[in-house]
Amino acid sequence: MKVVQELVQYFDRRGQLTRKQIHALLEQGFLAGEAPNTMLELGDQIGASYYFRVKGNPEGQVWGTGTYTGDSNVATAAIHAGLVKAGEVVVVKATVVQPLPKYQGSNLHGITSHDFGRYGTAYKLSAI
């Protein structure tokens, strides 16, 4: 699974995969693994992207808006970002990004995220 994800990431970064091709890989079960609780262990390589099956969980802690700290709960951040509802399962794309000097909290989609200062890792979530 990891090798397939690395190949897809390589071609996706270069704009060489269409949405239709990505969906075909997802439907065949070749692309998305279960979402980790946080992105801490995956946050070393800025620009790296991962596809995850996420079940919306409103109970986790989240810091930031749009760009989340690496220790923010992925399933809760996905609700906050409007990508999934509580209890629903979807596939999202998580991209490791340059950490921000400051994270602004907000209340979106029933989830309250918190402010935070500098943090070592960060990620963004997007729909597939």
Image: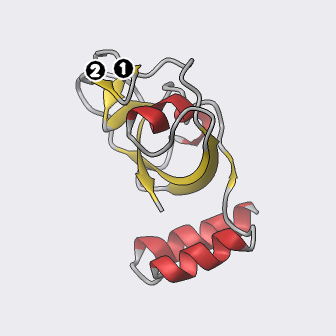
Q: Is residue 121 visible?
A: no
- N-term mark: 2 or 1: 2
Q: What's the distance in space between the residues labelled 2 and 1, CA to CA?
A: 5 Å
How packed mark 2 is, by other alpha carbons closer than 10 Å (few <14, some 14-19, many 20 or more), is some
In this view, the residue in front, 109 or 42, is 109
Query: Residues at badges 2 and 1 in contact (C-beta under 8 Å)?
Result: yes
For the point 38% across and 39% down, the residue is: 81
- The residue beneath circle 1 is 113
For the point 28% across and 16% down, the residue is: 117
User: Residue 43 shows which numbered tag?
Assistant: none
- The percent coordinates of residue 6 (x first, y second) are 62, 66
Q: Please, what is the three-letter code of the amino acid marked with disc 1?
A: Ser
Residue 108 vertical placement versus 92 (above, below): above
Q: Can residue 56 be seen in this view?
A: yes
- The residue beneath circle 2 is 105
How packed mark 1 is, by other alpha carbons closer than 10 Å (few <14, some 14-19, many 20 or more), is many
In this view, the residue in front, 92 or 121, is 92
- The percent coordinates of residue 53 (x first, y second) are 65, 50
Residue 36 vertical placement versus 128 (above, below): above
